[in-house]
Amino acid sequence: MPHQEYQTSIDAAIHCAYECEHCADTCLGSMPECVRLCRDCADMCWTIAGFMSRGSRFIPNVVKACIDLCEACATECESHSDNEHCQSCAKACRQAVEEYQKVVSVAR
């Protein structure tokens, strides 16, 4: 699969990373677990966007780890229902997971 075919997954990864960065910054000082997960998730999503842009042969391996991290981040952020930025982050994480699962299913 050439890297152009990853475009929707790259877009989802970048959007997820952006929302996680914003959420982590907003939660700083008040919700340490949310901040930690958002930062980890953002780092992985930025990384996976690079792997996909390059068409790396390790994409399936990295995507599997990123799915786990995005799901954990989404679950944490969903638990903060009174924070709009957490809900936006959770939604972006769930969308990224949907895209990443498509990549993993193609790689099988």
Image (tube, helix red, strand yellow):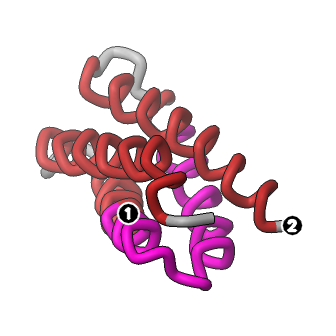
Q: Is residue 83 left or right of residue 49?
A: left
- Residues in magenta? 46-75
Give the quarter of the image for residue 32: bottom left
Q: Residue 46, image x and y in percent?
A: 31, 64
Image x and y of residue 14, in percent: 30, 49
Please provide percent x and percent y for residue 70. 52, 51
Labels 2 and 1 touching (C-beta < 8 A): no
Q: Which residue is mark 2?
A: 108
Q: Nearer the viewer, residue 44 or 11?
A: 11
Relative to 93, say whether 59 is above or below. Answer: below
What mark, if any, has residue 67 been given in the picture?
none
Pick the quarter of the image with the C terminus. bottom right
Among all residues in the image, which is located at the extreme right?
Answer: 108
Q: Residue at x 25, y 27 (%)?
A: 85
- Give the mark nearest the N terminus, 2 or 1: 1
Q: Relative to residue 66, is residue 54 drawn left or right?
A: left
Determine which residue is flagged by label 1: 49
Kindly identify the residue that appears in the image at 70 percent across and 49 percent down: 101
Label 1 SS: helix
Would you say the magenta stretch is mainly helix, strand or loop? helix
Mark 2 Cα shell of 10 Å, populated few (<14), some (14-19), many (≥20): few
The residue positioned 32% from the left and 59% from the top of the image is 42
The amino acid type, in three-letter code, at marker 1 is Ala
Q: Is residue 6 above or below residue 87?
A: below
Mark 1 neighbour class, 10 Å CA radius: few under 14, some 14 to 19, many 20 or more: many
Q: Quadrant of the N terminus?
A: bottom right
> How far apart are the alpha carbons under marks 2 and 1?
20 Å
Q: Is residue 91 above or below residue 9?
A: above
